[in-house]
Amino acid sequence: MLENKHDIVIVGGGPAGMMAGLLFVRAGLKTAVLEKHADFLRDFRGDTVHPSTLELFHQLGMLDELLQLPHSRLEQASIHIAGQQMKVLDFRHLPVAAPYIAMMPQWDLLNFIAGKAKQYSGFDLHMKSEAVDLVYDKADRVCGVETADGQVLAAKLVIAADGRRSVLRGKAKLPLQNIGAPMDVFWFRIDKPEGQGGDVFGTVQAGRFMVMIDRQDYYQCAYIFNKGQAGQVKAAGLEAFRTGLRSLVPNLREAFDQIVSWDQVKMREVALDRLERWHRPGLLAIGDAAHAMSPIAGVGINMAVQDAVTAANVLAGPMARGDNPDPLLERVYARRIKPVRRMQAFQKIAQDRVIAPLLRRTEPIDKAFFMLRLLNRVPWLRRIPGRVVGLGFGREDIRSPEIPVERL
């Protein structure tokens, strides 16, 4: 027997799921979000909130309040290569209210969105609620989800936002295209020595590449290595790992002594893939469940949020009027697939033509690549990659309807 009838049930409390939850309940639809964890606090989630996403909060009238949360701002970005710091990105000229990347813990962002959604009486957030299967009606249409504890939640539409290892997309047998990635990543953090800081986001040597995110009192570091070599790196020993880091970033050599156990180093397998179809009757996949993005340029959060905005723009108004959402699901896919393909093509080019050759290289890099030298020499050119990274492709404004907030 189906319980807890909702207009929308969203599986996954990440950026796509929470933003979709806010936008659909804001339009007057009874909405439930299921998150399998007890809270949003997880290490080394994407923390880069790009100008495109900040602009959406500006359109919602929430930007000033969001920016009261702890964050740092990245207006320009550089890469350290061949003994030089090369400026490569500039966000300061983007035509948005906040022309910078806000480096903000993802759990703070998700708690903020949840707080706003809870102001509406039609919103339910189910923590520690893991969806394990889809429920179908007699016409083989998805009509709800079943959770690990046996609860069944019915809905007019189920949205799968349950990440790159989505259970629901597998259950729905949606076709997945694996594009591939040549690298994996070790994530770790080190406290910042006094006087350190700046906008350096990457440092490169032959065979080694690390991204360093300045998080005010610490660096969040992503050490990139050839796919499948995590075991080999660990087998060489922790001291060899620290020695390599000291060589890569000599001015932080003492800070790397903070890494005293492999438990401090979290491995993330990089994936680049997308569904060839995002929907079936009663079900729509968005965010990482529809397309896993490479960590290149840190665009994952922002692509996922754009999916949520498009879904609400297309579906919220008609569903609020009582229309069947099924004929409209293809429209969501059609509006998002081109931006996704373009961004993934950009990432694949970066992977195959920049990162993979760097990781294979054995000779020292004695000169920065031509394109980096050009960007460093010509300031206005930095606005071009700044726009691609900061705003992405196919950016949408919020056009879904809004009803007055009913406070609980």
Image (cartoon, rainbow, N blue to C red):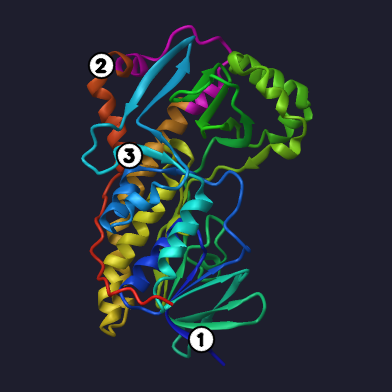
Residue 200 at x, y = what percent?
A: 46, 23
Distance between the Cα atoms at labels 3 and 2? 19 Å
Mark 1 or mark 3, earlier in chain: 1
Q: Give the left or right position of residue 112, taking residue 127 as reference.
A: left
The span shown in magenta is 355-374
Question: What residue is rendered at 62% in x and 34% in y?
Answer: 189
Question: What residue is rendered at 55% in x and 47% in y?
Answer: 45
Closer to viewer: mark 1 or mark 2: 1
Distance between the Cα atoms at labels 1 and 3? 40 Å
Q: Identify the element where label 3 is drawn.
A: helix
The reply to whether the magenta stretch includes residue 362 is yes
Mark 3 or mark 2, earlier in chain: 2
Name the residue that disc number 1 marks.
4
Q: Identity of the amino acid at label 1?
A: Asn
Q: How crowded is mark 3: few (under 14 residues within 10 Å), some or many (20 or more)?
A: many
Q: Identity of the amino acid at label 3?
A: Gly
Q: Give the left or right position of residue 218, taking residue 14 as reference.
A: right
Residue 53 at x, y = what percent?
A: 34, 49
